[in-house]
Every structure is written in C-alpha cells, then in structure tokens.
Amino acid sequence: MTEQEFDVAIVGGGMVGAALALALSREGFTVTVLEARHPELRWPDEGFDLRVSALTRASQHLLDNLGVWTAIVADRATAYRQMHVWDRAGFGEIHFDAADIAEPDLGHIVENRVIVRALWQALERSEVVCCAPVKVRRLMHEEDGIEVQLDDRRRIHTRLLVAADGARSQVRELVGIESRSEPYDQHALVATVHAEHGNQETAWQRFMQDGPLALLPMRRDLFSIVWSNRPDEAERLAALDELAFNDQLTEASESRLGRLSVCSDRAVFPLRLQHAAEYVRPGIALVGDAAHVIHPLAGQGVNLGFLDAAALVDAVRAGRDARRDIGELRVLRRYERSRKGHNTATQLAMDGFKHLFSNDRPALALVRNLGLGVAGRIGPLRRQFERVALGHGIELPSLSRPRW
C-alpha cells in the first residue's frame, strides 16, 4: 500500500467541495479531492441539467475570486432581474426588481453541472490532486492527523479531513456526528419547460396548498421548474403524458407566462430538513449538505455551502497564521461559530415559510396575503428583501466579497 500526505483531504468533489479545494490550494495548502464518481464534463449543447442553482451575489463573488465565473457565464448562466411571488388564493403578491437597489440583477440561474465543470477544469490546472473514482473505506485518528483508507488500497494522511460528500455523508457517519433529519412530506418535481411568453428575465414563484411552484429562468423562453408537492401527487404528475402535464403546469402557474410546455425528462426527489449536531471535531469539518439541508423554495442550498467553504478557508488560514495545527478544534470552532447560527436561522425561516404557505386555514391565508401585500407596497421593506436575495445582510467571509 502507498501513503500520501496532504494538509487537507476533501471527500466530495461537487460544487462546494471543488470550490473549497481550489480556494485552499490557492492559499498554499496541499489538497486532495476524493470523489466517488468522476464528474461528467461533456454533454450535448441542446440538453439542460435538471438540477440548477440560484446563485446570489456572494456566490458570484466567490466563483469570480476563484477565477471561474467568466467561464461559467461564457458556458451558460442566466441573470434574472426581477422576482414575482404570489399566493394561490387571495390578493397577496410581491414583485422585486434589481433596479430598486441599483443592481444589474438579483442573481443568476446556473445548471449545477456547468458550475462543476468550471471548477474541475480549474482544479485540473491547479496543484490539487483529484482522485476519482474512489471511495473511503475507513478512517483512523492519529496523533498528528487522520489516516484515510481508500478502496483502491491507497492511504491518505491528512491534517484536516473535510466532509463535502452530501446529505448522506459517509464521513459524517464514520466519525459519529449525529444529524437531525425530518422529512417534509413533499417531493420536488424538476424539469425544463418552454414558456409561450418568454421568461421575462424574472423568477416566478407561486405558493399553493401542497407546496410552491418555482420557475427559474433559463435562456429567453425557458424555465427550470421546481414543483414541490405531496409525494403521491408529484409521482402522478411525473407519470402524466406531456399534454396533460403541460395543462396542469400551465393551470398551476395561472397562465401568467402563457402556455408552459415541458421539453425535458421529469425527475422527482424527496425533500427533507437536516442539520448536523456538530460541524467540527478534531481534524474534521463538515460543509454544505453534509452539514445542513434546507427546503429548496428559496434556492439557498448551494449558496449556504459556498459560504461554508469560504468561512472554513478564513478559519484555517487564521489558524496557520497563528502557528496552530489547522486540525485543532480551536481553529475549526471559528468556522463552526461563523456558520452554524446563520445556517440555522435560514433553515428556520425556510421551514416557517413552508408551513405558513402550505396551509389553508383562513386566518393564516389572511396573514399571508396581508403580509405579501404590505411588503410589496413598502419600498424600504421590499428593498431589504431584495438585498437578502442577493446574499447581503451578514458578515461575509473573505472569498465571498468583491475583489475591488
């Protein structure tokens, strides 16, 4: 068996893990990425990824600081300048416009695979050692770090092991960090659809009894939809023939964009709330979905993960500058303190929205409609919502700030 030594080993080479690896390498750390499947970096031009992210300005800054934002925009990214949210019944709706806060847009909708491709292409030009496909078999704590045993009989010795391996994190399970997990009793149906009246550079979201319908703009007349529903209803919608599905989708959107027509496969996945009890242990850190999973209604999942990555970079850099071992608990606690509270607050807010809007009680319906109506008419309040949508309102890690 061979053994390699690294400052940091990252298990998981998705968006968050790849961004973290690139950032740490640029800080002078030796880094390896251990990924179970080599990501697909080529695909036909006419197809679209069913999984997309609504990137905030903070995420855009991070990707720009890592030198990949230009490649993402050149590949495929759609800016949205407005957002329209309305309730299924009543008069409540609110409209956001980037012009209100003198911004060029409210964010970008980008296919997940486009982000991964840009990051992995940058990794290939970096000093990061990418190992894929490979799986972790065993972890062993040692006095000066952690030994990672891989399924190809290699051994990795690292001062810091980062779990970026998703909601079902193997690393989190191996080190015994508990995670609170609650199903939402909702499944999300995702697809790409054509809109008769174009996307109008606007993200649309309608709250209905069984879950929200989000339409995220892609190109001029396309949307990526995330339609949350009861599990049985989501499966029924996925099984409908195209004509019947188009009819029901158009009705659900109240025809605000004309007729909607599906132009891709449809996929369904379950939704759940999940949060790790701890983000760190000696020599261990959890980031992204390995640490927290939220409802996709506001598209904040990957943005929280990117903030995790940026905060962890700040923490380990500060630890190195203080001449401490980057795997020390006191070093990693700085990361946990900076992110756990914000992630918890975001989870609670999304969970609250989910329960408030997926409820037909007359009193709550009145509160919803009054709230949306009032917020839409009070300029300062609406502008504050717009700033939050951009990712403002918290102390940002270094990588999530603009370079100028």
Image (spheres, rainbow, N blue to C red):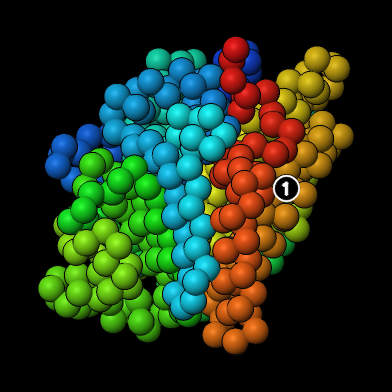
> How far across and down, in percent of the image, does residue 233 sit?
35, 82
Where, by quadrant of the figure, is residue 167 drawn?
bottom right
Q: Residues within 10 Å of mark 1 (few under 14, many from 20)?
A: some
Q: Give the left or right position of residue 294, taking residue 18 as reference.
A: right
Question: Image quadrant for the C terminus?
Answer: top right
Q: Which residue is mark 1?
A: 342
Q: Is the residue 23 above or below the residue 168 in the image?
A: above
Closer to us: 159 or 319 = 319
Which x, y percent locates residue 236? 28, 81
Q: Is residue 328 left or right of residue 17?
A: right
* Amino acid type, mark 1: His
Q: Residue 359, percent across and down?
A: 56, 81
Left or right of 231 in this view: 32: right
Against 367, residue 29 (above or below) is: above
Q: Secondary structure at mark 1?
A: helix
Q: Residue at x 63, y 24 (%)?
A: 401
Front residue of 272 and 224: 224
Report the front residue among 392 and 134.
392
